[in-house]
């Protein structure tokens, strides 16, 4: 890492050890294909990842990255390449299995939870990739995610907000069923329709629609569903995800994979996530994982 003051989002040595093999293998493969005419790499992968994490955690625009990072064009170029090559999804899958083993669970899950979240978008997002969620009165995009029962991300799909939950859920479930053949149970909320339940059955997955107990008032966690709701809360620790700022839905998915990778790496190394309160004050909050 360059000789500079560390930012709170920087990778520690322990977290870097978790993700370095994947990034180094990626670079070796590209260098092996003689990209760049065999020139030696100019940029430190750890500093590139630190800069990307800085953008994800703080919500800063790429052009506003601090000058002690590599040039923002370079950083964004790596982010785009890693997204298109599936590196962020790969890291998410690798760390998820490590966390599950650390928790005393099988590396591959047998049950999952599915949910969707509609978010507003920035002015930089093309209108063609947006829509309106009439139920929540939100114009923007929809994030549909699948997690295991402890809230770790299995898959994410970003669509226009007007896409019905069951439509996005069907595409996600097909993907997860192919990647996690041991899945046998899934929970969803009442926004998902009966044909989605029937589609899950064709994949060998028993899907259960969980609903709030009639007459319940105030906030009450719904069994099983609380795990995925908590995951959305974890994601909001990364300010880039408070709104959708990405021009391409695939880049939005990459930002979500990156946030989960950051959270799981901290969980594996026993490090805490610092809140956005002033770290010099006594009321600073530290969140496990």
Image (cartoon, grey):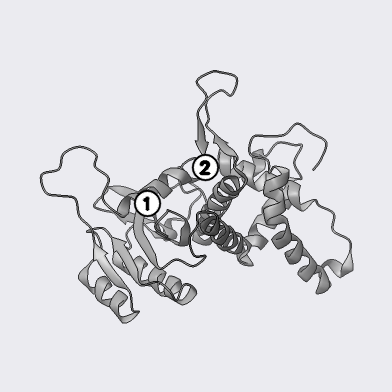
Tell me if I can see residue 16 in this picture: yes
Residue for point 75% across, 37% down: 67
Q: Secondary structure at mark 2?
A: loop
| 243 displayed left or right of 280 | left
Lower position in the chain sequence, tag 2 or tag 1: 1
Find residue 19 and name its label. Answer: none
Compared with 272, 159 (above or below) is below
| 31 up-or-down from 212: above or below | below
CA separation in Å, label 2 and label 1: 18 Å
State the residue at coordinates (47%, 58%). Answer: 153
Q: Secondary structure at mark 1?
A: helix
- Residue sitting at the far front: 104
Would you call the spot at circle 2 few (<14 residues within 10 Å), some (14-19), or many (20 or more)?
many
The vertical placement of 134 against 112, above or below, is above
Q: Which mark is residue 227?
A: 1
In this picture, residue 160 sits left or right of residue 104: left
Residue 17 or residue 31, whichever sits in front = 17
Q: Nearer the viewer, residue 196 or 206?
A: 206
User: Residue 247 in the image: x percent, y percent?
Assistant: 53, 55
Mark 2 touches mark 1? (CB < 8 Å): no
Seen at 57% across and 37% down, the residue is 272
Give percent across and percent down for residue 167.
32, 69
Q: Viewer-nearest of labels 2 and 1?
A: 1
Please give the residue where the numbered disc 2 appears in the rendered image.
238
**Would you identify the image quadrant in which residue 58 lies?**
top right
Residue 63, given in percent of the width and then of the height, sits at 66, 42
Quadrant holding the N terminus: top right
Q: In this view of the protein, can residue 120 be seen by the observer?
A: no
Instruction: Give the residue drawn at x 56%, y 46%.
Output: 267
């Amino acid at each position: 890492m360059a000789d500079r003051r560390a930012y709170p989002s920087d990778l520690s040595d322990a977290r870097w050890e978790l993700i370095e093999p994947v990034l180094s293998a990626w670079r070796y493969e590209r260098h092996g294909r003689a990209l760049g005419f065999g020139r030696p790499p100019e940029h430190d992968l750890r500093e590139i990842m630190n800069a990307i994490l800085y953008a994800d955690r703080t919500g800063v625009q790429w052009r506003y990255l601090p000058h002690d990072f590599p040039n923002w064009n370079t950083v964004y170029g790596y982010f785009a390449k890693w997204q298109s090559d599936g590196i962020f999804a790969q890291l998410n899958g690798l760390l998820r299995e490590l966390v599950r083993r650390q928790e005393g669970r099988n590396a591959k899950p047998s049950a999952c939870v599915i949910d969707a979240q509609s978010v507003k978008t920035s002015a930089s997002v093309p209108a063609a990739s947006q829509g309106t969620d009439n139920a929540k009165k939100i114009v923007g995009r929809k994030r549909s995610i699948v997690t295991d029962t402890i809230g770790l991300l299995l898959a994410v799909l970003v669509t226009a907000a007007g896409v019905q939950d069951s439509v996005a859920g069907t595409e996600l479930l097909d993907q997860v069923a192919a990647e996690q053949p041991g899945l046998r149970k899934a929970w969803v909320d009442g926004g998902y329709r009966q044909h989605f339940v029937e589609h899950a059955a064709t994949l060998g997955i028993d899907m259960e629609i969980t609903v709030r107990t009639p007459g319940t008032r105030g906030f009450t966690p719904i069994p099983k569903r609380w795990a995925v709701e908590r995951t959305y809360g974890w994601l909001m620790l990364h300010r880039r995800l408070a709104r959708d700022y990405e021009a391409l839905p695939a880049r939005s998915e990459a930002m979500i994979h990156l946030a989960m990778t950051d959270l799981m790496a901290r969980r594996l190394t026993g490090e805490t996530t610092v809140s956005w309160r002033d770290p010099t004050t006594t009321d600073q909050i530290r969140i496990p994982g």
